Image (cartoon, rainbow, N blue to C red):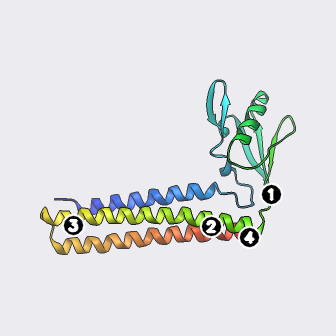
Amino acid sequence: MIDVKATLSEAGDEMEMACMYLETELSRVRAGRANVAILDGVRVESYGMTVPLNQVANVSTPDPRTIAIKPWDKKMIREIEKAIINSNVGITPDNNGEVIRLAIPVPTEERRKELAKQCNQMGEKIKVQIRKIRGDVKDTLKKAIKDGLSEDLEKDAEADLQKVHDKYIAKVDAMLAEKSKEIMTV
């Protein structure tokens, strides 16, 4: 016989992980403000190894429209610049010999709508994933009836599962609304 509380807890954990993934992905979307998270995916060739950018340089935002990258080893400046150009960041680096600056352009109205649509698509994928988790747990509960779980317990567990599902769907909606507001603000 299954442990209903453990099963529901596990489902909640999986839904939380899906929300955390969405949060990470949304932080990488460039919304017109300088955000060092857009450089999280940049990998730099350093002494024969490929490492994240933040392990070879100090990355900061001196103002809302600029990201400054100061390498710890000045010899790395070309490698960092090459890594940024080859990444999907979409910003051309400006190098003065000591610091690399990335000027974040103000997105056009059309680009902001496109970014908001892209974020909503990401959110919809996460909602589908949350619904799939709910469906898998429902199937597990239905099978547990055959293994001796009472129907009343199964119905109560399903109601609790629905509450957990609704909580995480609302969390995704709130995250998307917040990101959309950030994108659409000029």
Query: Distance of mark 4 from mark 1, alpha carbons?
Result: 14 Å
Secondary element under disc 4, as helix, strand or loop, is loop
Which residue lies most toward the right here? 96
**Residue at 35% over, 60% down:** 11
Secondary element under disc 3, as helix, strand or loop, is helix
Earlier residue among tags 3 and 4: 3
**Residue at 78% over, 65% down:** 108
Read off the residue under disc 1. 105
Read off the residue under disc 4. 185
Q: Residues within 10 Å of mark 1 (few under 14, many from 20)?
A: some
In this rendering, which labeled residue sits more in front, label 4 or label 2?
A: 2
Residues at discs 4 and 1 in contact (Cβ within 8 Å)? no
Earlier residue among tags 2 and 1: 1
Residues at discs 3 and 4 in contact (Cβ within 8 Å)? no
In this rendering, which labeled residue sits more in front, label 2 or label 1?
A: 2
Q: Residues within 10 Å of mark 3 (few under 14, many from 20)?
A: some
User: What's under tag 3, amino acid-wise?
Assistant: Lys
**Residue at 82% over, 39% down:** 99
Query: Distance of mark 3 from mark 2, alpha carbons?
Result: 37 Å
Residues at discs 3 and 2 in contact (Cβ within 8 Å)? no
Earlier residue among tags 4 and 2: 2
Q: Position of residue 60 (x, y in %)?
A: 74, 47
Secondary element under disc 1, as helix, strand or loop, is loop
In this rendering, which labeled residue sits more in front, label 4 or label 1?
A: 1
Left or right: residue 73 versus residue 160 is: right
Residue 36 vertical placement versus 145 (above, below): above
In this rendering, which labeled residue sits more in front, label 3 or label 2?
A: 2
Q: Position of residue 186 (x, y in %)?
A: 77, 69
Read off the residue under disc 3. 142
User: What's under tag 2, amino acid-wise?
Assistant: Lys
